[in-house]
Image: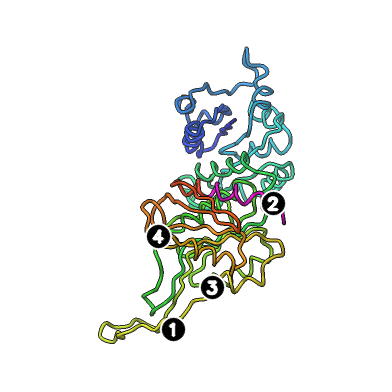
Amino acid sequence: MVLGITGGIAAYKFVQLARDLARFGAVVDVVMTRAAREFVGAISFEAVTGRPVLSDILAEGHALDHIRLAREADAVCIAPATADFIARAASGRSDDLLAAIVLATRAPVLVCPAMNDLMWSHSQTQANVEHLRALGYTIVGPATGPLAFGEGSGPGRAEEPDTVLEHLGRALGTEADWRGRRVVVTAGPTREAVDSVRVLSNRSSGRMGYAIAAAAWRRGADVLLISGPAQVAPPPGPAFQRVETADDMAAAVGDAVGSADVLFMAAAVADFRPAQPVAGKIRKGDSPDTLLLEHAPDVLRVTRERRRTGARIIGFALETGDGRDNAREKLRSKGLDLIVLNHADEDGAGFDVDTNRVTIISSDSDDELPLMSKDDVADALLDRVRPLLAERV
């Protein structure tokens, strides 16, 4: 990895990115512009990467560093990228080591803008950024938020290192079978109103669906994550749509499934809802002895006719006990290609944990996976779906 640091106040943030890349096993060569050294010391990057920081294009013994690094790089990431560097890169300048590497490399290039909001909004900066996109570079950010001291808040803030790391994962992890595929993932619980303050819901955290959405996006898919009120932050990358009730979920899936190549129905949609929700709060003294329930819509059933021809549909079945027969019945009756069975009553699986143990069931096989992280389950599931894409879609 070549990590380019240019001269902006956000330079300090990306010591963490260098550390994370090295921790994940990458060989990280940090290249700093002269202005960058005014904001953060080279020794900080050396300490977290174990490699010398490079800056000079004409240093004795390093005359061809720009060509060597350009050829060796699996990806080049400029973080932060100032308005000046973006302008120089857009015009093909090679007047320092970092700019020369960007010009010479054929690896994926990620550019992470960071500047004052007025500089970001200037028409010349916008034109430069669009030109970089046309060249095939990935633009990551900027975010909107607090700027340098006294400058208030606005667009121009550098994206956080963990977000940049996810974009690097996509740049390195894109697979031909997933590139450009339209993937819809549902996640989290739904909530049904009892009254204005109470709801009927379940313990789903959303972690499994979020992990699938992130993994599919890293592989190059165009991902829409439709989520109920989950306990975790949405992953960077996928488009995100928030819903509340089973009706909301059904409407969102119905709108999206017609253009989807793959639907992962990982949400824990409420099976039941109050038949007569009350406007306002039910006082304790007025509470009913019984709560009349009705079935909430079955999202997979009510959206079945809207599926794109040839789409792959993956359902989830959370069961207590063995549950295989019930899962197989859902596979058949809901027109699924696969169903993922997991167990609510097993330690380390189900709700409120970062791990899961699942069985991936098709019409002719049961693939029983060991207990693993939900991120690893997501990758195993995508590996299982990948050959199905070539068969039909």
For the point 66% across and 43% down, the residue is 175
Q: Which residue is mark 4?
A: 344
Q: Which residue is mark 1?
A: 275
Which circle, 1 or 2, is nearer the viewer? 1
Asked if the residue at tag 2 contacts the one at tag 4, i.e. Cβ–Cβ closer than 8 Å, the answer is no
Compute the Cα span from label 3 to label 4. 20 Å
Reading the chain from its start, which is encountered first: label 4 or label 1?
Answer: 1
> Is 165 colored magenta in this rendering?
no
Q: CA distance from mark 3 to mark 1?
A: 16 Å
Q: Residue flagged by tag 4: what amino acid is it?
A: Ala
The nearer-to-camera label among 4 and 1 is 4
Q: Mark 3 falls on what kind of element?
A: loop
Please tell me which of labels 3 and 4 falls first in the chain. Answer: 3
**Horizontal arrangement in the rendering, residue 268 relative to residue 286 (left or right):** right
Which callout, 2 or 3, points to the residue nearer the camera? Answer: 3
Q: Counting residues from the N terminus, which is met first, the one under dot 3 or under dot 1?
A: 1
Q: Amino acid at mark 1?
A: Ala
Residue 111 numbered tag? none
105 horizontally vs 282: left or right:
right
Q: Where in the figure is residue 162, as x and y percent of width and height? A: 50, 43
User: Which is in the foreground here, disc 3 or disc 1?
Assistant: 3
Mark 2 = which residue? 180
335 and 348: which one is in front?
A: 335
